[in-house]
Image (tube, rainbow, N blue to C red):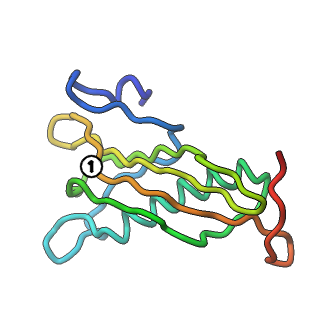
Amino acid sequence: MSESSLSGPPSDPLPTGHATLRAVAMPSDTNPNGDIFGGWLLSQMDLAGGIAAYERAGGRVATVAVNALSFHEPVSVGDVVSCYATVERVGRTSIRVAIETYVRRRDGGHTEKVTEGTFVYVAMDTNGRPRPVGP
């Protein structure tokens, strides 16, 4: 699915960042209300941010903070979840990544933003200690 096919009707928002991760929300990922559990969605976003940070750092990274996270709409079983990551800032050892999460609804295919957040990762050396991120 290309980014342009994710846009759906003209009123749907367009994702920003790089398409980093896609998954289908499954019944095992639901909370007691039948919606997709927020922790599952958070983990998908962390995976996407980790991929972007790993690529920018050129190696191992660890999540050190989730500075902001907003849930806008619920996610349902069968929705296709897509995370888009943008490296916002690179420090000496840290990388801040903005992540937007969209779903393509299973019932008709429209796409909408459901979650956004900012995650911070630290580049790690082979001993698990922070290391400088290259230019």
In the image: residue 102, left or right of residue 21: left
Mark 1, secondary structure of its residue:
loop
Note whether 134 is above or below 37 in the view shown.
above
Query: Pointer 1: what residue?
Result: 79
Residue type at mark 1 is Asp
Which residue lies at the image location 64% right of the left edge and 64% below the top edge? Answer: 121
Percent x, y of residue 32: 17, 77
Residue 47: quadrant of the picture: bottom right
Residue 73: quadrant of the picture: bottom left
Which residue lies at the image location 24% right of the left edge and 54% below the top edge? Answer: 72
Percent x, y of residue 125: 84, 69
Task: Characterize the local packing of mark 1: few (<14), some (14-19) or many (20 or more) Cα atoms within 10 angstroms.
Answer: many
Percent x, y of residue 117: 42, 57
Note whether 129 is above or below 99 in the view shown.
below
User: Depth check: 92 or 27 in front?
Assistant: 92
Percent x, y of residue 17: 51, 38
Q: Quadrant of the C terminus?
A: top right
Note whether 42 is above or below 6 in the view shown.
below
User: Depth check: 87 or 1 in front?
Assistant: 87
Number of numbered tags placed on the structure image: 1
Which residue lies at the image location 28% right of the left edge and 40% below the top edge? Answer: 104
Which residue lies at the image location 83% right of the left edge and 61% below the top edge? Answer: 132
Residue 69: quadrant of the picture: bottom left
In the image: residue 24, left or right of residue 127: left
Q: Quadrant of the N terminus?
A: top left
User: Depth check: 125 or 1 in front?
Assistant: 125
